[in-house]
Image: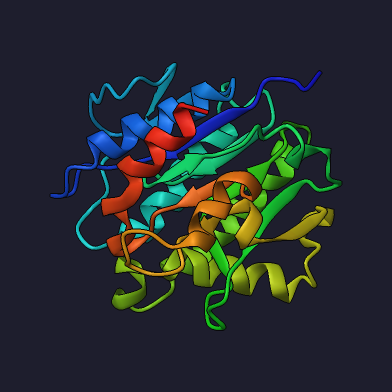
């Protein structure tokens, strides 16, 4: 019997209304028995079990704001069980308990982009090492804060994570880091087509499906398939 897992989404209203995506993301998590937490700066009701309020980000510093919000959760009393730092445009597609059977303190998903191989959309963390995770996130934030403006607007969080973790030979603060394959733990659809056979296979193999970019238009369709299973 696996212990309770929390799915934690950081989200700020910055001109794009992703509230319907949030509702689907949380509903998919609850479908597989997860508790849900929203880290945000405003009163948003998306079906979450708990809300952690943080300051609204300043202009063009979203990447640091996401890291700040993640650290706020790590430092909070809410972080008392295995958790997944999650994106609002992702769905839980299978029970996540087996992921935490793996031996890691921090599970990051390994993508295909050489410059930013770690994707910050799905991160697996354990509460037993929360003090060291907090120190690590402080390093991510400091590194991201030192970047030029263009990285503050986009990719700075992932760039900081990759650099800090790699410079510590994947053992920052003695943490056990495991780089998990995205196609199982943070899967993306293969392309922008409405249907592809390999995409439907994800429903049987991936724990999380992430609808990045233009793929968001397909999230509702896959939500229906997952929650009818």
Say if residue 141 shows up in the picture.
no
Residue 27 image point, x, y percent: 42, 25
Q: Across the whole image, how many numbered discs are drawn on residues?
A: 0
Give the position of the N terminus as an image quadrant. Answer: top right
Q: Is residue 3 left or right of residue 201?
A: right
Residue 162 image point, x, y percent: 61, 71
Q: Is residue 1 left or right of residue 39?
A: right
- Between residue 50 and residue 46, name the one nearer to us: 46
- Between residue 213 and residue 42, name the one nearer to us: 213
Q: Residue at x 40, y 21 (%)?
A: 48
Q: Residue at x 53, y 32 (%)?
A: 7
Q: Is residue 57 left or right of residue 76?
A: left
Say if residue 156 shows up in the picture.
yes
Residue 123 image point, x, y percent: 59, 49
Residue 60 is drawn in which quadrant? bottom left
Colour convention of the picture: rainbow
Q: Residue at x 59, y 36 (%)?
A: 74
Q: Residue at x 70, y 37 (%)?
A: 130
- Between residue 3 and residue 142, name the one nearer to us: 3
- Residue 86 higher or lower than 7, as above or below: below
- Residue 146 higher or lower than 67, as above or below: below
Q: Residue furthest front?
A: 197
Residue 167 is drawn in which quadrant? bottom right
Q: Residue furthest bottom?
A: 114
Residue 135 image point, x, y percent: 66, 50
- Residue 217 higher or lower than 35, as above or below: below
Q: Is residue 213 left or right of residue 37?
A: left
């Amino acid at each position: 019997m696996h212990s309770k897992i929390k799915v934690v989404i950081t989200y700020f209203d910055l001109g794009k209304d992703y509230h319907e995506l949030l509702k689907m993301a949380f509903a998919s998590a609850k479908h597989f028995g997860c508790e849900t937490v929203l880290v945000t700066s405003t009163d948003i009701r998306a079906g979450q079990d708990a809300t952690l309020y943080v300051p609204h980000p300043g202009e063009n510093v979203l990447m640091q704001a996401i890291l700040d919000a993640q650290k706020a959760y790590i430092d909070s009393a809410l972080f008392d069980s295995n958790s997944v730092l999650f994106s609002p445009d992702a769905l839980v597609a299978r029970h996540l308990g087996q992921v935490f059977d793996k031996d890691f303190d921090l599970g990051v998903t390994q993508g295909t982009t050489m410059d930013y191989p770690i994707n910050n959309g799905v991160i697996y963390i354990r509460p037993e090492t929360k003090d060291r995770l907090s120190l690590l996130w402080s390093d991510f934030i400091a590194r991201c804060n030192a970047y030029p403006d263009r990285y503050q607007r986009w990719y700075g969080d992932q760039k900081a994570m990759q650099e800090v973790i790699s410079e510590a030979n994947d053992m920052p603060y003695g943490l056990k880091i495991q780089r998990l394959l995205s196609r199982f733990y943070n899967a993306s659809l293969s392309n922008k087509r409405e249907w592809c056979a390999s995409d439907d296979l994800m429903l049987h193999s991936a724990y999380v499906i992430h609808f990045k970019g233009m793929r968001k238009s397909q999230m509702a369709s896959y939500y229906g398939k997952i929650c009818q299973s």
